[in-house]
Image (cartoon, helix red, strand yellow):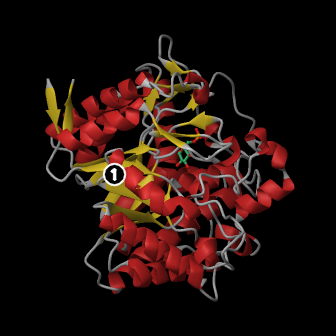
Amino acid sequence: MKLTFPDHFMWGSAASATQTEGASQQFGKGKNIWDRWFELEPERFHNRVGPEHTSQFYQNMKEDIPRLVATGHNSFRTSISWSRLYPEGTGDINPQAVDFYNAMIDALIENGITPIINLFHFDMPLAMQDIGGFENEQVAHHFARYAASSFRLFGDRVKYWFTFNEPIVHVEGGYLYNFHYPNRVDPQAAVRVAFNTLYASALAIEQYRAQEQDGKIGIVLNLTPSYPRSQHPADLRAAEIADLFFNRSFLDPAVKGTFPPELLTLLEKHNLMPSGLGQACAVIQRNTVDFLGVNYYHPRRVCARHSLPNPEAPFTPEYYFDNYTMPGSRINEDKNWEIYEKGLYDIALNIRDNYGNTPWMVSENGFGVKDERNRIVNGELNDDYRIQFYRDHLFWLHKGIAEGSHCFGYHVWTFIDNWSWSNAYRNRYGLISLDLQTGSRLVKKSGHWFKALHDNNGFDY
Ligand code: BG6
């Protein structure tokens, strides 16, 4: 069966500034929270590899961009590093950053690749974190100024923008579960950070529209469908609440401009509702997205809790459910993530039916593998497992599109194996394998396969 995708479908991959650029404290860049955390606790990074040791896109950009063409990209998402453009987060612009991003955008376009630019991928400038990060409403305004400058500097050529990548992740990591700096467990702060992030996103969208550029702006959300263990009312309720906290908390305000009332009721019940939200809510309501990016790696399965929660413990959404491993599920053991391709179809139909069929793209989908360099034989990396993963997800995506969901692109994570926060190079995801010692690049079998996928605008399934 030949699966063909719509005309002008966007094929490519996603990456981010801090994960690829290297030169993390050179060429005028200010520190961000990753530079700081690595200075403080290098042992929390896999093999003690920090943000200086990335694929060095800053220096290799001219050679790497043709590799995008060789691996089937007609579009590519990366981010601007806020602390490279504004070393202090606000104040003066770093002219070297302007030169670098101009050169990158121009080289992409010269190579026939549509640039998709994101403004924030987990990388808060340290100077902004030092004044409270998104706990401080002022930082939302600083973000909007940085966004407005980016539109003014690059918006003549960049026509697809994202404000944030997976905004719930810096909330979870930094303020609930301790896997990002500032490593706090503070539900009150988490809710405020989440709220001000949405406010910052809406302010940036407002700035974009004020400049009247003929492009589109959206947000990337990691939508993780919540599946109940069974149809028992307690399991169904558990799944509904997980969905409220982990998906609808950002999806509803981003697309509809409003928060799910039940989420607000739950936050009130736990005394977590921030005060003084009126004006910010109005900004959020007025500035919904033109389109969505959806990152999908794995589903979430939940069941009713087996024990009563401790009402005195710091609140986390798990107050209302237990995570659940479905017997018989297929797991990527290296990540301990379930593989469930149909999740992408369920997302497609959810957006079609419950979110006004907003245009969207798969902005990340990928398969991380440990010690993948050991699989190189005679100079080739035959990552058939990854091709299988893409094929099966694309089958379900195609079905969702055929049934009317308005998806216009599919990006994998990622282009060249990249540095991934505290996991550093533990899990390799790239279409191209990176030799950490020499920096040399090797196109994996999936990179060649992706080129054919792009050239044929589809594949035989
Ligand atoms: C995505 C993030 O969710 O997961 C990326 O947007 C990250 O920034 C990717 O690199 C893979 O994460 P990990 O931890 O498996 O390497």
In the rendered image, the quadrant that contains the N terminus is top left
> Above or below — where is 96 with respect to 57?
below
Indicate which quadrant contains ligand 1: top right
**269 or 183: nearer the eye?**
183
At x 18% / y 53%, what residue is drawn?
8
Asked whether the viewer can see residue 259, the reply is no
Residue that protrudes farthest toward the top in the picture: 328
**334 or 315: nearer the eye?**
334
- Locate residue 415 relative to residue 349 in the image: left or right: right
Q: Which residue is mark 1?
A: 69
Residue 81 rendering spot, x and y as whole percentages: 57, 68
Residue 275 rendering spot, x and y as whole percentages: 62, 71
Q: What is the quadrant of residue 214 in the picture?
A: bottom left
At label 1, which amino acid type do we have? Answer: Val
**84 or 395: nearer the eye?**
84
Label 1, secondary structure: give it.
Answer: helix
Residue that protrudes farthest toward the bottom in the picture: 92
